[in-house]
Amino acid sequence: MKCKNLIFVLCLCLSSIAFAQSDQDSIPAFAKNGISKPSIVSTNPFGIFISRLNHNFKLKASKRTEVSVNLESGNVWGPNVKTFIPADEAFREQMRGIAWFSRQFYFDEETMEAESFEIETDGVIKGLRANITIPTTKNQELVVGFRAFMLTNGKFPFSTFTNDKFIEFFHDNIAGGSDPFDRKVFGLDKASINYTDRNGRRLNAGNGDFLTAGIETHYYYYPTFLNDKKIYMNLGAHLGTNLSKYNMSMDVGVSVAGVKQFDINDRNFILFGLGTNVLRKNAVDLQNDNLDFGTNDFIGSLESDIEYTFISKGKTYHSFGLSFYIQTSLHQKDEDEYNVYIRDDEAFNSWGHGTRHLYKNNDYWSLIYTFTRKISTSIYIQQDFTVNNNPDLQTGVSVKFGI
């Protein structure tokens, strides 16, 4: 029933978008305000369970209430890997001198004292995000948002570019080579996320299963002391409430971002944006049996953006943006130096990425196009070139309008 309700909400949002686009004369003119960027936070299979922060590159607070709706689709994949964290310090020191993929041959699960966790991921994670921005004072605003995610098998046409068959077609014919991640070995267009944390708590999800939801509150202040130099800043305070049965908790964070504008002429300009934030995840646990989605309590991120915009006839803005996003690791990095990783018997290519890269910084690139007139409509494509446990490919569409 939860799955059907979520699908209904998605269809309702798409219908609303289509209606809005077809009836733009009834909508107040929407002014471009800074870098036109939807939420590009990845559908990371661990990250969706916490309130990771999207960077804000607006020039000033909104003058009236605004609504935005984002739909996203990300392909996640990692064969089953069981990870052991040995307790014996002498054995840890021995493992530090052995390549990570060979440590399993020195480890006896029956006799060695160790904590463990196990994870496998496969499928396309669909996400819905909706925000309402409410002006409070001249230079301040409140943003209240909702997010929800479900797991699908990525069948065509609902996941045209993020399904397994398209990605493996790209690998075979353009870059990557034949089956570089063993997707074909385990079968294409399937859906399952199975995770057992080091406390023995479990997450098991399949095609059509609801994964998680959350409510987010952001408050932004826009100082104006550098505006005469066309430098614009904002400071943010953030509160996120996670509402899934796997992690019911509250996260808190702070952020700062800046944008510099360079005018080429009266119809062309370039914007540079730089933002950073830090989040204290699970600052308040709302239940006692939350799954462990990372041993790092604090998650930080940094994003840099560049956007070129030209104004066509009719005061229509066409914006082309490129974003680089990097986030600190979900797990404490030192464990990776001595962890013992046990691969699935059928996996051979890149089999450790899904687990080991929980210990590595998380980064990806996004290419964004935005069309702004009465409504601001954005589409983006996102790629994790370093295979750091993000979706192999993610796409998204967003609309924003004033009311």
Image (cartoon, rainbow, N blue to C red):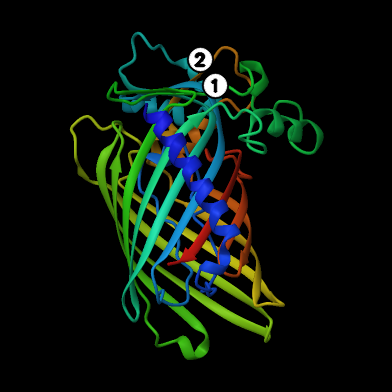
Q: Quadrant of the N terminus?
A: top left
Say which mark, if any, is on residue 196.
none
In the depicted structure, whether residue 181 falls above or below residue 265: above
Q: Which residue corresponds to the image point at 40% horizontal and 88% vertical from the top-left?
A: 225
The quadrant in which residue 268 appears is bottom right
Residue 365, percent across and down? 60, 53
Q: Which residue corresponds to the image point at 55% horizontal and 73% vertical from the top-left?
A: 32
Seen from this angle, which residue lies furthest top?
A: 110
In the depicted structure, whether residue 277 falls above or below residue 394: below
Seen from this angle, which residue lies furthest bottom?
A: 228
Q: Where is mark 1, residue-wise?
A: 102
In the depicted structure, whether residue 135 falls above or below residue 122: below
Q: Is residue 362 visible from the viewing direction of this image?
A: no
Q: Amino acid at mark 1?
A: Ser
Camera-nearest residue between 12 and 219? 12
Q: Amino acid at mark 2?
A: Phe
Give yes or no for contact between labels 1 and 2 (Cβ–Cβ under 8 Å): yes
| Mark 1 → mark 2, Cα distance in angstroms | 6 Å
Q: Which residue corresponds to the image point at 66% horizontal and 33% vertical from the top-left?
A: 157
Would residue 45 appear left or right of 322 to someone viewing this image?
Answer: left
The quadrant in which residue 307 appears is bottom right
Would residue 6 appear left or right of 297 to someone viewing this image?
Answer: right
The quadrant in which residue 171 appears is top right
Q: Where is mark 2, residue-wise?
A: 105
Helix, strand or loop for disc 1: helix
Helix, strand or loop for disc 2: helix
Residue 101, percent across and down? 55, 24
Answer few, some or many: residues within 10 Å of disc 2's Cα (few below 14, many 20 plus, some between 14 and 19): few
Q: Quadrant of the C terminus?
A: bottom left
